[in-house]
Image: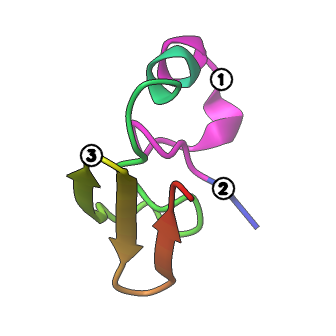
Amino acid sequence: METYCDRCGKPSADGGHEACRRARALEPPRYCVRCARRMVVQVTPMGWTARCVEHGALTSA
């Protein structure tokens, strides 16, 4: 099963995602790692939630 970068949405196997990993330390995921769909993201003072229409929700907690 192919996985995708949760920041740029490109296949993880392509490499070159060092900048994505650094940026993810400070921001929520934007793409689903299972299907590469853009997720609905909500950021609050207490954290974030990200929801894929196909695979469900992730939270920072």
In the rendered image, residue 22, in percent from the top left (x then y), is placed at 53, 15
Q: Along the horizontal axis of the image, is 30 left or right of 29?
A: left
The disc placed on residue 45 is: 3
In the rendered image, residue 7, in percent from the top left (x then y), is placed at 42, 38
At label 3, which amino acid type do we have?
Answer: Pro
At label 1, which amino acid type do we have?
Answer: Gly
| Among numbered discs 3 and 2, the one appearing first in the sequence | 2
The disc placed on residue 46 is: none
The residue at 43%/87% (across/down) is: 54
The residue singled out by tag 1 in the image is 15
Secondary structure category for the residue under label 1: loop
The residue singled out by tag 2 in the image is 3
Q: Along the horizontal axis of the image, is 44 left or right of 32?
A: left
The residue at 49%/46% (across/down) is: 6
Crowd class of label 2 (few under 14; some 14 to 19; many from 20; radius 10 Å)? some
Per the model, the C-alpha gap separating discs 1 and 2 is 12 Å
Instruction: Please report the bounds of the magenta region as a residue range.
Output: 4-20
3 shown above or below 13: below
Question: Is 40 contained in the magenta span?
Answer: no
CB within 8 Å, label 1 to label 2: no
47 shown above or below 16: below
In this view, which residue lies farthest toward the right?
Answer: 1
Crowd class of label 1 (few under 14; some 14 to 19; many from 20; radius 10 Å)? few
